[in-house]
Amino acid sequence: MPKKLSNENKMLREFFLGFVKVHVLHHARRGPIYGVWFLGELERHHYQLSPGTLYPLLHSLEASGYLAREDRVVDGKVRKYYSITPNGEKALAEARQKIRELVDEMLEAEEPVEAKPPVERRLEAAVRR
């Protein structure tokens, strides 16, 4: 019987799957990728994803128009290669911008956060830059 994930684990899994999608687009932008290679790439970053999770994710990105698939015969077997599409390029550019903003905010000097509305904190941060 499969082990049930706690709500916390489910949330973390959703976060990490979002990271994986951006990672897929990043590498597909550099050149065509295929599933087994990408599983190895993820392991290099200490992600443990099963083929049963990765392949539906790749198919979903293809169905959404972010990736295009090309089937190639390699060693007598069909291998599916995925490349980024113009829509995928746009999504990746937007994701990069959001990631930059988030990382900048998260890595700001460790100063105590006052009980100010988020807009006021952002305005103060913008003035400091």
Image (cartoon, helix red, strand yellow):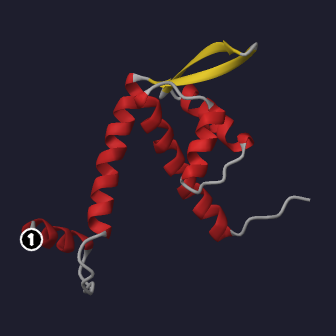
Q: Residue at x 63, y 70 (%)?
A: 8
> x, y (%) of residue 22?
46, 43
Q: Residue at x 53, y 29 (%)?
A: 64
Residue 51 quadrant: top right
The N terminus, quarter of image: bottom right
> x, y (%) of residue 33?
54, 29
> x, y (%) of residue 2?
86, 58
Figure check: 14 above or below 70: below
Between 85 and 83, the one nearer to me in the picture = 83
Figure check: 58 above or below 129: above
Helix, strand or loop for disc 1: helix
For badge 1, the amino acid type reads Arg
Furthest-front residue in this view: 75
Callout 1: 10 Å neighbours few (<14), some, many (20+)?
A: few
Figure check: 23 above or below 48: above
Q: Which residue is mark 1?
A: 128
Q: Residue at x 74, y 41 (%)?
A: 52
